[in-house]
Amino acid sequence: MRKAIAGLAAVLVLAIAVQFFLAGSGAFNTAPNDESFRPHRALGYVIVLLAIVMALTTALARMPGRLVGMTGLLAGLGIAQPVIATIAKAFGDTDNTTTAGQLVFGLHAVNALIMVAVAVRIHREARELSNSSSSTARAAGDDARPAGPASESAQ
C-alpha cells in the first residue's frame, strides 16, 4: 500500500507540473480566456480529485499523521484554487489596468506554488516510507534464515 501511495504522490507532482504548462499556454493563447484555460481548469479538477483520494487512502492505510495531514492540506489548497479564481472574477476586470481582481488572482499562482512544495514533500515522505518498509521486510527475511554452518555456506 505504501508503494501505491508513493506512486500516487508522483502522479500528483507530475499533474501539477503539467498544470503549470497549461496555465502558461492558456495565458499566451489568442482565444478567449474561457476557451484557452479550459484544459487548465479540467486538469485542476482532476488534481483536486486525486488529492482527495490520496488523503482518504493515506488515512485508511493508517499512514503517519503528518503524511495524512499533508495530503489533506493539499486537497484543501486544491479546493481553494477555483475559490480564489471566483473571488478574483467577482471584482471584475473591465479594463486592462491593474485591478483588485488581478491582485487577488495573483494569489492563485502563489497557492499553486505552495501546492507544488506540499506535493513534493508528500512524495518524498511517501517514498521514504515505502523504501523503509521494503528494507524492513528484507531484513526480516534475513532474520528468518536458520543460523549455523549450513546457512553460512548458503550465503
Image (spheres, grey):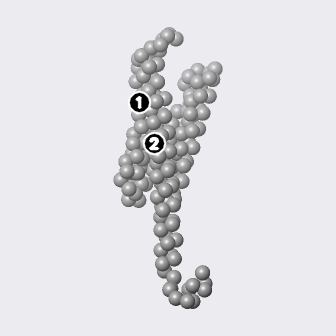
Q: Residue at x 51, y 76 (%)?
A: 141
Mark 1 to mark 2 CA distance (whole Å): 19 Å
53 relative to 32 in the view: left or right: left
As drawn, the residue found furthest toward the right would be 30
Q: Where does the image place residue 89, in percent across and percent down from the top left?
A: 44, 21
Q: What element carries label 1?
A: helix
Residue 118 seen from this side: yes
Which residue is under mark 1? Answer: 83
- Residue neighbourhood size for the residue with mark 1, other residues' Cα within 10 Å, grouped as few (<14), some (14–19), many (≥20): few
The answer to whether residue 49 shows anywhere in this view is: no
In the image, is residue 56 above or below residue 148?
Answer: above
Q: Which residue lies furthest to the bottom in this view?
A: 149
Q: Is mark 2 on a helix, strand or loop?
A: helix
Q: What's the residue at 50%, 45% (across, down)?
A: 120
Q: What residue type is labelled 2?
A: Val
| Disc marking residue 118 | 2
The quadrant of the rendering that contains the C terminus is bottom right
